[in-house]
Amino acid sequence: MNLLSVLHSQATLAFVLLAVLVLKRNYRSVLNRTIGVIMLCFAIWNLADIFHHDPTQPLATIRISANVGAVGWVTFPILFLVFAVALHRPGTTRLPWWQYPVIAIPPALFFWQQLAGNLNAGHVNSPYGWTTVWSDSIWTPLYFGYYVFTMVVGMFLTIRFWVRARHVYERRQARLFVVTGLIALALGTNFNVILPVILGRPSPEIAPLAGLIWAIGLYVGVARYGMLSLTPQAAADDVLATMSDAVLLISPDGRVESANRAAGELFGIPLPELAGRPADRLVGPEVGFERLNRHILDGGPLGPWETDIAARGGRTLSLSVTGRTLRDRHGETAGYVWVLRDITRRKQAERDLVKSYEQLEHRVEERAAQLTAANRDLNEEIANHRRVERERDRARRELQALFDNTEVLLWSIFEADDGRLCYERVNRAFAAVEGFEPEHYNGRRLADIHAPEQVKHIEYSVSRARSGKPHVYPVSFQRGSETRHYEIRLIPVIEPDGSVRRFIGAGTDVTGFRRALDRLEGLPGDRTSRPRPV
């Protein structure tokens, strides 16, 4: 094993170690995961070159190692482009699903062509080990075009991030990445492409070793400047930028040194125009920033303190002001920081609430008077209702006593759901005719009490009464040797919907009347003028 093989073996371990360290810092970040995979690609490439730079290795081993190393050199260019794009979105933790096939297709395509022999056509032994012979197929220029395109676009995006960085630490991070990346790119391109063409003979292929310079630059950016991870300075700037409260940094002479976006929106003034303005002129003399600054110099932090100011456009703003003195490391006053919270809506809501309370109190008084009158009317209504209930209850008891004790036969029947007729209730006179108690009939079907012929007779009478008019018919009962005659009147009960399902029967004892008629039948005279039985 020669020196180059040893260097490649050491570089393989270094790349793996750096990948682990980068992923350990924040494996959820797309940036960290991309850099980790790029370093693993270089580790695979260096692993293959351990055999590639050993002239004693057989050609079969070199071909296998070349295919293994191809995994690294066909994959890292597209990953570098992904890293450059993600550099502009450092908080991204997941890529859209459709980007994964776009990232995977180019490396898979070129790796397939490598296995088919359309990229590395062969290998020639040289003083530096085995030298790769590129194929004359169309896939070789396509790969170099893919490599150049991803490198140029990725480097352009990185330089663009460097130029547009808002913070010093971001510019230092981007500069470190660009410088180390350009050094690694220059060394790898010169030794692997340019020198063999100029010299006309093979030169050491150290591109994967040169990538270690770029990997170290990335790791320094991670470890020293917080690259690819959250830093206190970035967090503070982002918090100030997203705060809904206005924050003013005021110099000791009372001028605005800096302000966040909420301050510009609060006062209706662009941020560049806020810088350098006297604070008292900005918010009006009624706030008295100089007086408040002297107050916090004596007693420390102030607030919250509420005041009203006249803003642009004739608006009046209510503010809650909190202040604190900023001191340098020598204890001297470096300025003041003021946090102004817009409480205009809250103050308006408080005023509306007081007004609503007053209106509510007036309405409560009116409502109380109405409720007193309504309560008096309700008590009178309740008294009338109770009196009516007492009268109704007395009438019900009287009616019940009349129903139970009258000599007239009274009963009520109803039509059940199955169409059968049932007794609802009967009085004592009705039950005594057949020698039973009233409870014997209540709720029972007629067919369970009377003979079939008697039931048919009652059903016929019910069918006649369904027309809505009472049906009158005679009935005779035999009790021992005595026969009693009754005139039955079956009265239909018409429901609100016009249906008839209940009937009330009343039977009058006409036995005496029938006997009188019978005696009249036995007397001589004109019978046409005599009364007839029903």
Image (cartoon, helix red, strand yellow):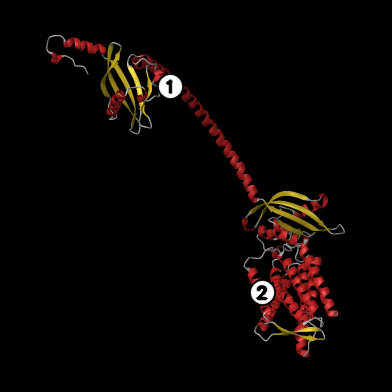
Q: Is residue 282 above or below residue 387?
A: below
Direction from residue 167 to residue 145 in the image, left or right? left
Percent x, y for residue 159? Answer: 73, 74
Direction from residue 196 to residue 355 in the image, left or right? left
Q: Is residue 216 visible?
A: no
Direction from residue 506 to residue 7 in the image, left or right? right
Determine the residue positioned at 12% across, 10% down.
525
Percent x, y for residue 133? Answer: 73, 85
Viewer-side residue, 109 vs 318 = 109
Marker disc for residue 32: none
Direction from residue 410 to residue 273 in the image, left or right? right
Percent x, y for residue 151? Answer: 71, 77
Circle 1 sits in a helix, a strand or a loop, which is it?
helix
Percent x, y for residue 511? Answer: 26, 13
Q: Amino acid at mark 2?
A: Ala
**Residue position marked by numbered label 2 in the rendering:** 108
Where's the C terminus, which quadrant? top left
Circle 2 sits in a helix, a strand or a loop, which is it?
helix
Viewer-side residue, 70 vs 398 = 70
Residue 147 figure quarter: bottom right
For label 1, the crowd category at 10 Å Cα-Cα, with few meaning under 14, some 14 to 19 and many 20 or more, is few
Determine the residue positioned at 82% across, 86% down.
127
Determine the residue positioned at 55% across, 36% down.
363
Q: Amino acid at mark 1?
A: Val
Residue 239 figure quarter: bottom right
